[in-house]
Amino acid sequence: MNTCPVLSPAPAEALTSSPLGQLRRLVVMVDDNQVVITGQVSSYYLKQMAQETVRPLLGERLLLNNVEVCPEAA
């Protein structure tokens, strides 16, 4: 069982290939039990878009959306 968070190609790649620039700057950490998204975006819409972009790649893992909404992040 891997307990150390590592960058996972699949969820991270989903965001880095996004047409939305702010989503490409987010960090995705993955372990056996969860996927955690962190970083800053300028709107709640973008926070939700990040979550929904990663959701199909979760498998049985939980999703923690720790993205902060900061209007200055644009």
Image: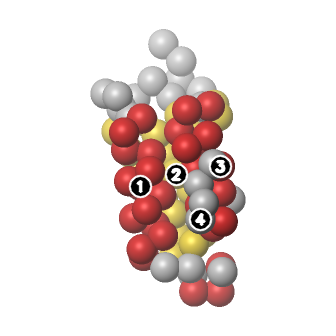
Residue that carries the numbered disc 4 in the rendered image? 20
* Three-letter code, disc 4: Leu
Report the Cα–Cα distance between label 1 and label 3.
13 Å
Residue 39 showing in the rendered view = no
For label 1, the SS is helix
Residue 74 in sight from this viewpoint = yes
Choose the circle earlier in sequence order: 3 or 2.
3
Give the left or right position of residue 13, taking residue 33 as reference.
right
Q: Secondary structure at mark 4?
A: loop
Q: Is residue 7 above or below residue 15?
A: above
Between the C-alphas of marks 4 and 3, the distance is 9 Å
Q: Which residue in the structure is indicated by mark 2?
A: 37
Question: Of callouts 1 and 3, which one flags the residue occurring earlier in the amino acid sequence?
Answer: 3
Give residue 18's position: percent from left, percent from top: 59, 54
- Residue ID at (57%, 72%): 41
| Mark 4 touches mark 3? (CB < 8 Å) | no
Describe the element under mark 3 as helix, strand or loop.
helix
What residue is pinned by disc 1? 51
In three-dimensional space, the C-alpha distance between marks 4 and 1, rounded to whole angstroms, equals 13 Å
Please tell me how crowded label 3 is: few (under 14), some (14-19), or many (20+) other residues with Cα within 10 Å.
Answer: some
Residue 49's place in the image compared with 45, above or below, is above
Residue 43, position as x, y percentages in the image: 49, 79
**Cα separation between marks 2 and 1:** 8 Å
Report if the CB atoms under discs 1 and 3 are less than 8 Å apart.
no
Q: Kindly check if marks 4 and 1 are in contact, taking CB atoms under 8 A apart as contact.
A: no
What amino acid is at disc 1?
Gln
Task: Give the residue drawn at x 59%, y 65%.
Answer: 20
The residue carrying mark 3 is: 16
- Give the side of residue 59 with respect to residue 17, left or right: left
Q: Earlier in the sequence, mark 4 or mark 1?
A: 4
- Amino acid, disc 2: Ile
